[in-house]
Amino acid sequence: MLDRSGLSDVHELKLNGVQTKLVIFHKENYDLSRKCRSKNRIERLNQIIIWFKTYI
């Protein structure tokens, strides 16, 4: 189930001109760092790497 609060936060950021990207892993919960499917864990880490390369 999608977190409506998180979607609202992303919407507000976009309305205020903040470059924003929402990555959703269907059928996963908030414990992605430990209990998600292997392919989603890899994709999560890839998204983190992309963020660091872009903003740091």
Image: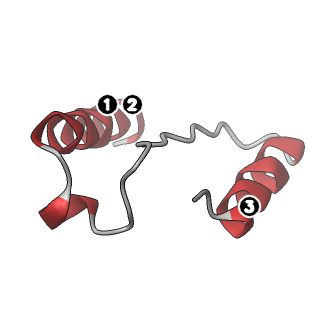
Residue denoted by label 3: 9
Q: Amino acid at mark 1?
A: Ile
Q: Quadrant of the C terminus?
A: top left
Against 36, is 53 above or below? above
The residue wearing badge 2 is 54
Residue type, label 2: Thr
Q: What percent of the width, then of the height, locates residue 41? A: 18, 45
Residue 7 placement: quadrant: bottom right
Q: Is residue 14 left or right of residue 50?
A: right
Mark 2 Cα shell of 10 Å, populated few (<14), some (14-19), many (≥20): few
Q: Would you say 9 lies left or right of 20 here?
A: right
Q: Residue at x 89, y 44 (%)?
A: 15
Q: Which circle's residue, 2 or 3, is located before the other in the chain?
A: 3
Disc 2 to disc 3, C-alpha distance: 21 Å
Please tell me whether mark 2 or mark 1 is closer to you in this view: 1
Can you give x and y, in whole percent of width and height, for residue 9 in the image? 74, 61
Which residue is rendered at x = 57% and y = 37% of the image?
21
Badge 2 element:
helix
For the point 15% across and 36% down, which residue is it? 42
Residue 39 bears which disc, if any?
none
* Place of residue 50 in the rendered image (x, y in percent of width and height, measured from the top left): 31, 31
Mark 3 falls on what kind of element? helix
| Number of other residues with Cα within 10 Å of mark 1, as a class: few under 14, some 14 to 19, many 20 or more | few
Quadrant containing the N terminus in the rendered view = bottom right
